[in-house]
Amino acid sequence: MFAAIILSKCLVPSVAELRRFEQATKADGSLSFLVVGDWGRRGGYNQTEVAHQMGIVGEKLDVDFVISTGDNFYDEGLTGVDDPAFDESFTDIYTAPSLQKQWYNVLGNHDYRGDALAQLSHILKKLDGRWLCWRSFIVNAEMVDFFFLDTTPFVVKYFNKPKGEVYDWRGILPRNHYLSNLLKDFDLALKESSAKWKIVVGHHTIKSAGHHGNTDELVVHILPILKANNVDLYINGHDHCLEHISSLDSPIQFLTSGGGSKAWRGDVDWWNPEEMKFYYDGQGFMSVRIDPSRVDISFHDIFGNVLHKWGTSKQLYSST
């Protein structure tokens, strides 16, 4: 049954290391999807309540897929492909009919503290056909291209000051070589994209007023690439909140959806009010509707309230 509704298929990669997938749009050329991050706690810390509201909103919007911004399984990822946490934190939680769609997942830092390769394994997709997780990959959907970026290896402290935590760096070392190739491939893929909209998804923040704040390594290495390639949205998790920050020097919108379970940290470093559009310290998720001329985002809490809305338009056809 699931095979009949899954909309994405793997294409031959045109950029080294970055796999490409195709996502069909609706008949009217639009897409709707949900974004949730930092969620995998076997239903605890209101994860179940977030999932319930996702199901309701997903049905209203007739969502085409779900994006996870990482930290999929706490506290230390999966122990292997047979870890019961996969069912207990994913399959048995997101049970609403509207959520039985493709899930596009990236890895967060907590996922790297377990068996990171387990989440990339085809075995998990056999266990639950919704699951798709790669380190970095691209989803092409006609008018919009999504670029999913593996941000954890950029963060120096996970290598130099792990605080007793053990990270699964298989496939990452030597780190400099991995990051150099990733930056080159990421930049090239963005340059080659002719999509009307460009959306980048990563686990770590670039701009955030939350507990973790800005990720300096991404500000240095990733932000210039986003600006140079006219990226519209950067979507992340990591900070356990819902957040929208704009930019005074570019049209990029920085959107945090990391409220999938444990939240309410209470330590907010309030941002420049000209850029800070919205901040909510609690649990929730984000919804997005996009078509060739407009994108609309909404942030939702566990009670069904819409906390914040934002939208923007582009000309359907460029003038010549």
Image (cartoon, rainbow, N blue to C red):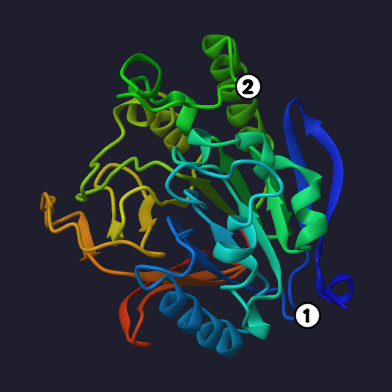
Q: Residue beneath label 2, please?
A: 170
- Residue 143 or residue 128, whichever sits in front: 128
Question: Along the horizontal axis of the image, is 49 left or right of 127?
Answer: left
Task: Measuring from the top left, give residue 316's x and y in whole percent.
Answer: 61, 67
Question: Along the horizontal axis of the image, is 203 left or right of 106?
Answer: left
Task: Measuring from the top left, give residue 310's x and y in whole percent.
Answer: 36, 71
Q: Assign a secondary structure to mark 2.
A: loop
- Residue 75 or residue 122, whichever sits in front: 75
Q: Quadrant of residue 297?
A: bottom left
Q: Quadrant of the N terminus?
A: bottom right
- Residue 207 or residue 320, whichever sits in front: 207
Q: Residue at x 30, y 24 (%)?
A: 163
Q: Residue beneath label 1, please?
A: 27
Q: Residue at x 81, y 69 (%)?
A: 6
Of the numbered discs 2 and 1, the one sitting upstream in the chain is 1
- The circle on residue 135 is none
